Structures are given as C-alpha cells and as structure tokens.
Image: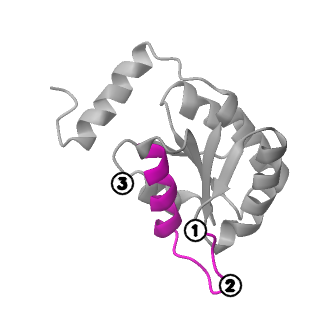
C-alpha cells in the first residue's frame, strides 16, 4: 500500500519510527515535508499529505503533530479527504469502517511509538463497510460541494 506521511516538529520522531515499521511490513511509505530543526507549521505537511491522497497518488495518509487536532482540521480542508483524529485502535477501526477515512491524524505527544504502530496498523488493515455508512459519506461529499446534505 502506498502511504503518504507527514508531521510537524512535534511528530518528527514518531514519523521516523513509523516509517521503518511500515516499510518492514511491505508498505511503500513516503515522508512528505520533513520538518526542519526550527520547527514546522502543521498546515504545510497536512496539505502535502492530503493532496497526495485526494489525487490518488497515495492510498492513505498519516499525519502526526502534537495533538493531532491541527493536522485533522487542516487536512479536512482538502476536497476528497476524510481525516480522522484517532487515539486508539477502536477509533482507527471505526474511522475506516464507518467513515471511510483516508487520512489518520495522531498525537506525537500523547501516544508512544508502539501505540502509534498499533493504531496505524489497525487503520491500514480495516476496510470500509459501505451500506448505511456509504450514504453518510455521500452526505459529507455533498457538504464539500457546498450542498445541503439533507437535500
């Protein structure tokens, strides 16, 4: 699977560890916009990863900042991206199976390397269930187009 990964300075160490883990498991993982020593503003890597996912250049994306919140907000501004903040394997599984999330956002400050591995592995291994959830995802797409989802 082709995975685009990005972080700000607070997620940099977690990303370095995660890249090795994903590559060891056969994924084509690429880090975009590596943060500098002076830091990084989270909207830049969020846009880079979200754009790759939205264009189809990457299957899924992973974003890590201090809390995951800023990355989630920024990535969700890109049409076609459904970025979900996840704190554990359950939220990662539901983000994929119910919401068809294509980007997962994580906290580099609150989660350790092993927990991040488990969350990302769950996210990557989970399929979208479709069914009643597809109707809801279609309504999200309507919002992206500026349409009332109840219409």
Q: What residue did someone put label 1 on?
A: 33
Q: Earlier in the sequence, mark 2 or mark 3?
A: 2
Answer yes or no: do the residues labelled 1 and 3 have beta carbons within 8 Å? no
Looking at the image, which is closer to me, 12 or 114? Answer: 12
Locate residue 19: give its quadrant: bottom right
- The residues bearing labels 2 and 1 have C-alpha atoms spaced at a distance of 13 Å
Badge 1 marks a residue whose secondary structure is loop
On screen, residue 63 above or below 91: below
Q: Is residue 43 magenta?
A: yes
Looking at the image, which is closer to me, 29 or 129? Answer: 29
Q: Is residue 6 magenta?
A: no
Instruction: Give the number of the disc on residue 54.
Output: none
- Closer to the eye: label 2 or 1: 1
- Closer to the eye: label 2 or 3: 2
Instruction: Give the number of the disc on residue 37.
Output: 2
Answer yes or no: do the residues labelled 2 and 1 have beta carbons within 8 Å? no
The local crowd at label 1, few if under 14, some if 14 to 19, many if 20 or more residues have their Cα within 10 Å, is some
The local crowd at label 3, few if under 14, some if 14 to 19, many if 20 or more residues have their Cα within 10 Å, is some
Segment tinted magenta in the rendering: 33-54
Residue 33, visible in the rendered structure: yes
- Closer to the eye: label 1 or 3: 1
Residue 90, visible in the rendered structure: no
Q: Earlier in the sequence, mark 1 or mark 3?
A: 1
Q: Position of residue 83 (x, y in %)?
A: 49, 46
Which residue is rendered at x = 37% and y = 41% of the image? 80
Q: In the picture provided, is 23 more to the left or to the right than 4?
A: right
Which residue is rendered at x = 32% and y = 27% of the image? 138
Q: Position of residue 78 (x, y in %)?
A: 37, 52
Toward the top, the furthest residue is 131
């Amino acid at each position: 699977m082709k995975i685009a990964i990005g972080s700000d300075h607070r997620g940099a160490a977690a990303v370095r560890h995660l890249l090795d883990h994903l590559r060891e498991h056969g994924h084509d993982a690429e880090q975009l916009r590596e943060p500098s020593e002076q830091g990084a503003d989270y909207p830049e890597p969020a846009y880079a990863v979200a754009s790759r996912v939205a264009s189809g250049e990457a299957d899924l994306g992973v974003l890590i900042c201090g809390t995951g919140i800023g990355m989630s907000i920024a990535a969700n501004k890109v049409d076609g991206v459904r970025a979900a903040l996840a704190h554990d394997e359950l939220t990662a599984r539901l983000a994929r199976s119910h919401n068809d999330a294509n980007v997962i956002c994580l906290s580099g400050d609150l989660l350790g390397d092993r927990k991040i591995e488990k969350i990302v592995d769950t996210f990557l291994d989970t399929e979208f269930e479709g069914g009643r959830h597809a109707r809801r995802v279609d309504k999200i797409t309507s919002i992206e187009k500026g349409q009332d989802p109840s219409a």
